[in-house]
Image: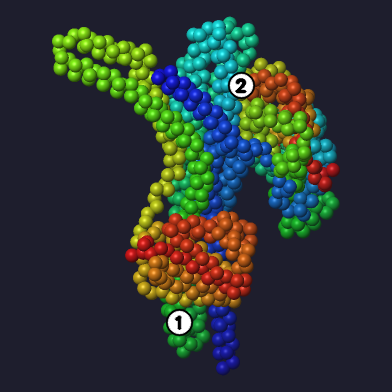
Amino acid sequence: MKINVLLLSLLLITGIALGIFYHKNAEDSAHENYMVSVNLMNQLKQTDAGLNVLLLKSRYGLQADYDELAKKSVLLSDSFAKLKKSNMARYLDTDISLADALREYEEQINLKIDLVESFKSHNAVLRNSIKYAPPLGDQLISTLENKSESDASLLKKINQALYRWSLYGDKEQADIIQDNVRKILDLLPLFSNEIPLLEYNSHVIAVVDEQEQTQNYLQNALAIDSEKTLSKLDGLYTENYLSSSANDGQLRSYAIIAYGLLALLVAFYFAMKLRGSYTQLEDKVKDRTQQINSAYKEVKESQEQLIQSEKMASLGQMVAGIAHEINTPLGYVNNNVSIVNNLFISMDTLMKGLSRVYGEAVKKPNNKEALSKQVVQVLRQYHRMEQDDIVNEAKELLDDSSHGLNDISELVKNLRSFSRLDRQLIERFDICEGLDNTLKIASSILKQSNVSVIKDYNEDVFLECNPSKLNQVFLNIITNAAQAIPETGGQLTISVKKMDDTVNIIFIDTGEGMDEETRAKIFDPFFTTKPIGEGTGLGMSISYKIVKEHRGQVEVQSEKGEGATITLSFPYQNVE
Amino acid sequence: MLGVTLFLRQTYKIGLSIGCFLMSQAALSAEPILPIPSSLPHDPDKAALGKLLFSDVRLSKDNSLSCESCHFLDRAGVDFLDQSRGVNGQLNKRNSPTVYNSALNFRQLWDGRIDSLDDQVRVVVKNPKVMGMDSWEETTQKLKETDNYAEQFQNIYGRPINSQDIQHAIAEYERTLLTPNSPFDRYLKGDANAINQQAKLGYQYFKSYGCVSCHQGANVGGNLFQKVGVLKDINLLKGFGTDMGRFAVTGNEWDKRVFKVPSLRLAVLTPPYFHNGSVRTLREAIDIMTEFQLGRQVPDAHKDAIIEFLKTLPGDLPKGGK
């Protein structure tokens, strides 16, 4: 009897120890290690995207210092070094394609960093020369104009091309400069002070060389598809992780079997009971492994969304800056078109004159005198037009316009690396299903703070929206609620209500609530109550933006210590 | 009629270029130079340990040199020699840059061949022409035997003294060597009287002549590479020497005579100038800059104003540094 008790308590203790060991260690630290690598990859993705934006800003003179750009390069190589040493390293020996992807990515970012360095050097020189050369050219032209018209016209041609090129950077102007640059020094004898012409010569050469280099390095750097390689890497890594955590799960079941056998040895009748619970346990283990696997996939998807949104925010800033670059040629084209339009008025007068002559000739073919008078009038008009060179003028204006349009399309090409934004699909979305899915993803964090979730929804309610974005909003709100609830536990109630003209989704938590200050700032970007390094402070501001994009409203009711109620409402016309 | 359209078109073009110019100016109105942060993230205990090591001659083979022998902490972090002298009086080929604000540089050394401050320590201690230690085992052993380094490292890093932590401690100390709060930084932050009229003018010239294309950011340089002689062949300058700079690191043809653009934060305090210390005065350095880097003539009065501006760049030396 005593032995029985002893063995039983031994069993109990081993069981508890095993349970704690597997629950805490195996699963949690594997999670954490996995997340470290995933977070590093996310950081790399963001840094890379930020780098692209800064490159374009520097190219178009919207960023006057290279500190940020230099920091991004450093961050890129630092994060990569960390990634290489992170949990991912475990799988490199066994998975060749993972190792290959990692190597490919390393090569890509190293190349990119080198290209960025070259870009910076050339861009710095280009910006100086392109600012200095054209006004200097104007000065030289005005000194020459009194002396020699023809020589002045050479400089005029070059300088005009320089102006245009510095504004739009089109190839044709570059060719004009290239063809004429060698003739500049022939003008030396015309100047008593040669220095300005020599300076002009070297700056024009610098512009030609540096513009080409700068553009090349920029395009090549932007063309590196490191993001794609990273996604591949991410995918392969996750596969490895999932299969190894499946192994862990297996190990866990073995441990339980061993435990069961041990128990069998201790006492047969205990074994009978234990057997039942063993199968139950194994089922649970399997079930949980599967749940976790699918949750991981979804978490990763939603993280990608987040990055996409942050990228969009910085894109927004950049687009504002670049708008004027597009506006300039656009204004020019617009103006040219209206001038050409005016030119056509004189064409029209001419045509009317001709048709009058024709009418006269048909009506009174014998009235030679009147006829010839009319003809002379028309010819005079034509002559005047010829003198004014209207046709050529119109042609030139139209040529100019097509340059302007080319420049716009060049700019648009530069932006194309960000153009995956077009993929925003609107779908019919089952709100309840979305909430269920999100709750599944958030299950670990909910469990961590012992949150019991009350689902106060069952009807099918549909919304026309971007499902993944709306799920992102749900996830943000649920995560915040879970974090606001102390570890001793609490409740989160989610209800979906059809109102007169809106659908309301209401999240009520029993967490610590917010004071007025927090409430006021909750939607500000970068505002966070979490310790530094834990939250980006972007979650709620992104959510806010998403809700606004869907023409919805967010309402926050909360007092310190009293929990919080967040109400999302979307207009009914979105709802079927 | 055409006269009118031509006139319109011409005025439009002029207006357009002025508009563009203004826009580009407006876009650039963000200042290219930024204030130095008052501190960088660091661990004070580790930095204090690094400070001891920075002045410890045991880091050199014959106990003759510490870091401070070539980077005087009380005098702007340089040694004022054309080129530094390492163990046994060996002549180096380069001038010692300041250690102040070096944590703000994107890479280390004139040719940027080193990425981090930690790594710089790793390399310099073993460099036979600088501190000349045979290995890091030797260095660690030497430090272990003396004073209470072993104990301090154990306490602060929580593990036995080792090369990695020694390097880290010195680097951590270097991260505290900042010179914030300069008159110019105060001016940038809105104190219009922090610098005089001449210096303000100098800053305008520094921007309008294009010095800021290369010397910008918080360190007024130190964040990009640049060829010396971008607008005029530097071989035309006597005494510039044969150092090919970054070319020796990358082997790329274009990298000949490419150096890290040096920080100008403490330039007024740190003659001689350039990678080989070949230039005695700031004025000569600026003469070379305008001729070879800007490719244009700059009147003497403007250069004087630029020097007046450079004088406003040094900030407070850290208290521990004096």
Could you tell me which quadrant the C terminus of chain A lies in? bottom left
Q: Is residue B127 above or below residue A260?
A: above
Closest to the observer, A390 or A203? A390
Q: Which residue was labeled with disc 1? A: A277
Q: Would you identify the image quadrant in which residue A346 lies?
A: top left
Q: Would you identify the image quadrant in which residue B109 lies?
A: top right
Residue A74 location (% of width, % of height) = 60, 43
Tell me the element at label 1.
helix
Kind of residue at badge 2: Leu
Tell me the element at label 2.
loop
Return the chain for callout 2. B
Q: Which residue was labeled with disc 2? A: B231
Q: Is residue A351 left or right of residue B316?
A: left
Marks 2 & 1, CB-CB < 8 Å contact? no
Q: Is residue A140 above or below residue B19?
A: above
What residue appears at the point 60 percent right and 71 percent down from the top-left corner? A559
Q: Which numbered disc covers residue A352?
A: none
What residue appears at the point 61 percent right and 64 percent down from the top-left corner? A518
How busy is the neighbourhood of tag 2: few (under 14 within 10 Å), some, or many (20 plus)?
many
Kind of residue at badge 1: Ser
Gap between marks 2 and 1, in whole Å? 83 Å
Residue A63 location (% of width, % of height) = 58, 38
The answer to whether residue B302 is seen in the rendering is yes
Closest to the observer, A222 or A317? A317
Display coloring: rainbow
Q: Is residue B57 left or right of residue A264?
A: right
Q: Is disc 1 on the same chain as disc 2? A: no
How busy is the neighbourhood of tag 1: few (under 14 within 10 Å), some, or many (20 plus)?
few
